[in-house]
Amino acid sequence: MNKLYLWGIIITVVMLAATYYTLVITAGDSGKSLSEILSGDIVNALAIAGAVALVFITIFVVIKYVRQMQTDTADGKLAHEKWDGIGEYLNELPMGWAIMFLLTIIWGMWYFVLGYPVNAYSQIGEYNEDVAVHNAKFEKEYESITGERLVEMGESVYLAECKVCHGISADGIDGKAANLNARIEAKSVKYAIEHGANNHLLGMENPMPDRNGLMNNNTGALITDAEIDAVSTFVANKMTGAGADVFAGTCAVCHGEDGKGMESVAPNIVAFTPELVINILNHGKKGAIGAMPAFDRLNAKQKEAVGAYITSLSK
Amino acid sequence: MFHWLEKHPFFFAVAVFLVIAFAGLIEILPNFAQASRPVIGTAPYSTLELAGRHVYIKNSCNACHSQLVRPFKSETDRYGHYSLSGEYAYDRPFLWGSKRTGPDLMRVGNYRTTDWHENHMKSPTSVVPGSIMPAYAWMFTNKADIETAYAEQLTVAQFFSVPYNKPVPMKDGSTMEVKMGADLAEANKLALEQASLIAADMKDQDVKDAVANGQIPEIVALIAYMNSLK
């Protein structure tokens, strides 16, 4: 018997023994018997089968090529050219290789012409699908909610988008933003009177004029500093205290005698309304405290929900 | 053919050049595609905004903040539309960042305002209770480097044809023009004009006074830059 085959058998036995030994140790560590491991997760049995197969394949391949090196003689025809004394056989291409080469070329043509341009993965495509699925789900589950659930939705949107400025408890974080627990502060009223207010927000053509356009009908003259202070405090105190006459003479024409506003004319300045909140979300606001950007990213339902939530805060 | 080429070094070199040039074209041509041109609505940075960008880079803001909104629903909900390559046309270098310890700032100008930035840079936890961002108090006293910003403007205008003093198309169909001073004095004046608009929205009296005296604290430049990110 050729010495090569003998070595092959010896190495096979040694490697199988090593595999078995490793398995026994592993089994010992995990506190299971070998048969338990084999009958457990199929992956274990497959891995062991793979290991055994690898041993046999390795030995077979090594023996094949070592035999070939021992017995083969160079009898092929050499090509005409030599490169630095190194020749090249004029052998036929191996059939398997040639077929694979040809198939690769065909696949390459398909891939460049059709595969990539038509079927390629697109990140934006996946994003668009995600958004469509989400929007469909939103429409189905949330588009028609009202009442308590709408306020809950508003609270979660508020906590995601608004709390960074207005604070978790909506108190405006020490005057850094508007306190949403009360409709309006005296300084905001004063600012609106002195600078006017852009009630284009409510879809009208005539913004609220600044102090040079605000007549006090009681006195027949432009509103004065003292009157501004009085009426600001009056409005901030929920329409109580001094300043009622100024309000009746100057503001009530548009904002109503009770301050609850008039549709398409002036907003409610006694309490928040969803309509007012939605307008500010759409257009932003600039007032006594600072500027607020528009939040166009929210969809209509989310804006409505924020409106409901903020209205619920000061009730 | 290959045998022949191997025996003729000159033509071999030509063939090698052609192959590499083809590969180069494949890589280079897409850069001229419409998608990599400035997106409509993307305007060059003004002098003050560039100075703010330098402050941003100097303080390594990009180590914690990215400027790249990826196309995922969760990100576009939070930050706005996903980023397009043409939006970085005037960013040299772009500041994508590689890590988000803080939030993305690609479109921060859409949902934060001057006064918020002022509060936040002075004391981040005063507006975001759980924030681990440090306060950047020195920005309220250090002065912005308008000279360097103007030098960069001149350079990019000359070498990369960045459209300063030219109409730039906006999304609503209108055009806007970002002005670049003809000399440093005019650049300073333009920067100061923009700075006083921002200082008017701020509360810190020292900053207001500095701007009134013709000086521009770093915070003003930084806020101008933040507000320009849309």
Image (cartoon, coloured by chain):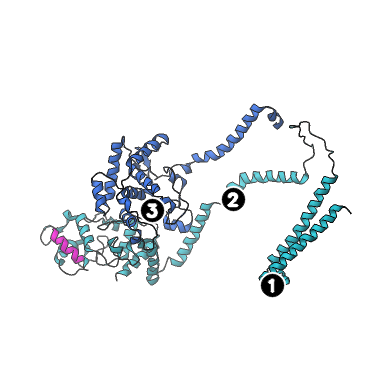
Res. B108 mark: 3
Describe the element under mark 1 as helix, strand or loop. loop
Q: Chain of mark 1?
A: A
Q: Which chain is blue?
A: B
Magenta segment, principal secondary structure? helix
Q: Which residue is more in the foreground, B94 or A31?
A: A31
Dot 2 and dot 3 residues touching (CB under 8 Å): no
Res. A229 mark: none
Is B183 above or below relative to A313?
above
The hue used for chain A is: cyan
Residue type at mark 2 is Asn
Name the outermost residue toward the left: A219
Residue type at mark 1 is Lys
Q: Which residues are magenta?
A: A223-235
**At 33% from the left edge and 50% from the top edge, which residue is drawn?**
B223
- Same chain, labels 1 and 2: yes
| Residue B14 in picture, x, y percent from top left | 62, 29
**Which residue is denoted by mark 1 in the rendering?**
A32
Left or right side of A145 for B5? right
**Quarter occupied by the C terminus of chain A:** bottom left
